[in-house]
Amino acid sequence: MKLNNECCCGCNTQMSDQTKENNCPVCNNEGILVSKVTVEHLVVDDYRKAVEGDQYKICMNEDCNVVYFNHYNRTTFLKDQVSVPIWFKRDANPKHACYCNKVTEEQVIEAVVKQGAKTIKEVNAITGSMKNSNCKEKNPLGVCCHKIIQEAIDKGLAIK
Ligand SMILES: [Zn+2]
């Protein structure tokens, strides 16, 4: 459900106080819960100490500058305060498919298009993705990257 934040008198900022705790304080899109461990590892060094509490969410809106937010202590971490590009944000460069081994979406697509890989296993063998995985600390969502790799494979298969 999306809250209606449109207003004729410019009082949007006051309304953001009532935003649901799940929603990004900037764009009001719903966020996904991310573990504190993940946030601590991915913010740049200067902000590591500012990571407190365990109620962090990640904003999934590709156009929003906010990466992590926490309504309880009112912290937000923007794209430039996080040490890796967030693959689903519009201008992410490079777009990583596997963060643990720094394999990009492009490399996965290339493995599919040029080398005929069709499965995650084949892509892993060609690109070295998903080796020594430590997704809890390296992936911005703190979850295994196989889903992103599968999406990249699907993109590659669609181009082919
Ligand atoms: Zn947002």
Image (tube, rainbow, N blue to C red):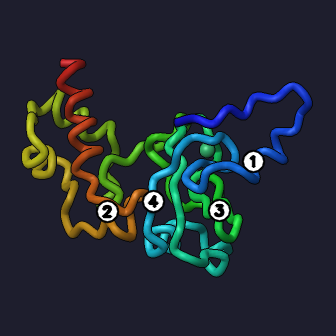
* The residue carrying mark 3 has its beta carbon less than 8 Å from ligand 1: no
Left or right: where 139 falls relative to 21: left
The answer to whether 74 is drawn above or below residue 3 in the figure is below
| C-beta proximity under 8 Å, tags 1 and 4 | no
| C-beta proximity under 8 Å, tags 4 and 2 | no
Of badges 4 and 2, the one in the foreground is 4
- Residue to which mark 4 is pinned: 33
Q: Earlier in the sequence, mark 2 or mark 3?
A: 3
| C-beta proximity under 8 Å, tags 1 and 2 | no
Name the kind of residue labelled 4 in the image. Answer: Leu
Secondary structure under badge 4? strand
Q: Earlier in the sequence, mark 1 or mark 4?
A: 1
> Quarter of the image holding residue 129?
bottom left
Distance CA(mark 3)–CA(mark 1): 11 Å
The residue carrying pointer 3 sits among few (fewer than 14), some (14 to 19) or many (20 or more) residues within 10 Å by Cα, namely some
Numbered circle sitting on residue 16: 1
Q: Residue at x 31, y 60 (%)?
A: 143
Distance CA(mark 3)–CA(mark 4): 12 Å
Secondary structure under badge 3? loop
- Residue 35 drawn at (x, y percent): 43, 69
Q: How many marks?
A: 4
